[in-house]
Image (cartoon, rainbow, N blue to C red):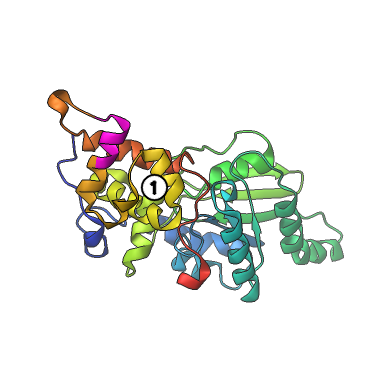
Amino acid sequence: MRPLFFISIKRILDIMPDINWYPGHMAKTRRILVDQVKSVDAVIELCDARAPGATRNPDLIDIARGKNHFLVLNKCDLANDNATRQWIHHFESQGISCVRFQSTGGKAKDVLNLIQKAAQPAVERMKARGANKTVRMMVIGIPNVGKSTFINKLRGQAIAKASDRPGVTRTNQWVKVGPFLELLDTPGMLWPKLENQKNAEILAFLGSIRDQIMDSEELAGNLIKRLMTIAPKETMARFRIGEDAKDKTVQEVLEDACRGRGWLLSGGRFDTERAAAIILDEFRGNKVGRISLEIPEER
């Protein structure tokens, strides 16, 4: 069944107080981070490589100001390689140290090199005093960007709790990654007011906004229409729809997908609710292909 209360993308910009958009635990998280950042040596910010611009929280950037700080484009194995290269060039041209990171497989060497570089000033200060320094870094990012999985991979074992849904890490926890390195895993934090509708839509596509408050059918239909402008061949093949889908209404797009994939109820009625859930899951699970939802020149 569809939720008793859901919202459309168009209302995301206005509904924050009414639907627990910026819940109390996020407000509390912000207060804690402002305090804890004072005691860390550096900050590691994670964004989603499929939409690096939309998945950077300006509040978190502000909290990290004044600290050694670098950006990790996480889940780059789900993103388009060319788009990721454009984003790295974009950030580096702004003086932002950044590195790509795979959510599965791959190696952590580049990230560890940046960690070492960011920690060096603190290490040198402690060496001058004749002491060994345990470097402490804070890992920040929006919900569902993969902070806990990132930390687990650096450590090599599942210590930080990880899950592919927003809001799993609800408390700050220190994780020892090596003999002289500790990382603070923090809850995902959104910002109180999303003023850009395109960004809000991207966050919903990626699952950083809770599905329970969304009109999933509208969201899935809009996702297909968006994918048709980015990767039409892959989208048509996966959901068995025609090239004209980009010009159709959301309802028509969902019905085409139901017809193509056989998502039907008794009497031949279209099961658009099931279709919406599967479309969102398959996109987020990389079943459509390696797709980036934005490039720097679009921002």
Q: Quadrant of the N terminus?
A: top left
Q: Where residue 185 appears, x then y in whole percent? A: 55, 48
Q: Is residue 170 visible?
A: no
In the picture, which quadrant includes the C terminus? bottom left
Q: Residue at x 32, y 70 (%)?
A: 195
Give, as a single range, the part of the protein colored magenta.
256-263
| Farthest front residue in view | 243
The residue where tag 1 is placed is 207
Give percent across and percent down for residue 100. Answer: 64, 55
Q: Tell me: 22 left or right of 252.
A: right
Q: For the view shown, which residue lies furthest in the top direction?
A: 266
Of residue 39 and residue 108, the one placed in the foreground of this image is: 108
Residue 4 located within the stretch drawn in magenta: no
Residue 231 image position (x, y, % from top left) = 45, 52
Q: From the viewer's perspective, is 227 left or right of 159?
A: left
Q: Residue at x 38, y 53 (%)?
A: 228
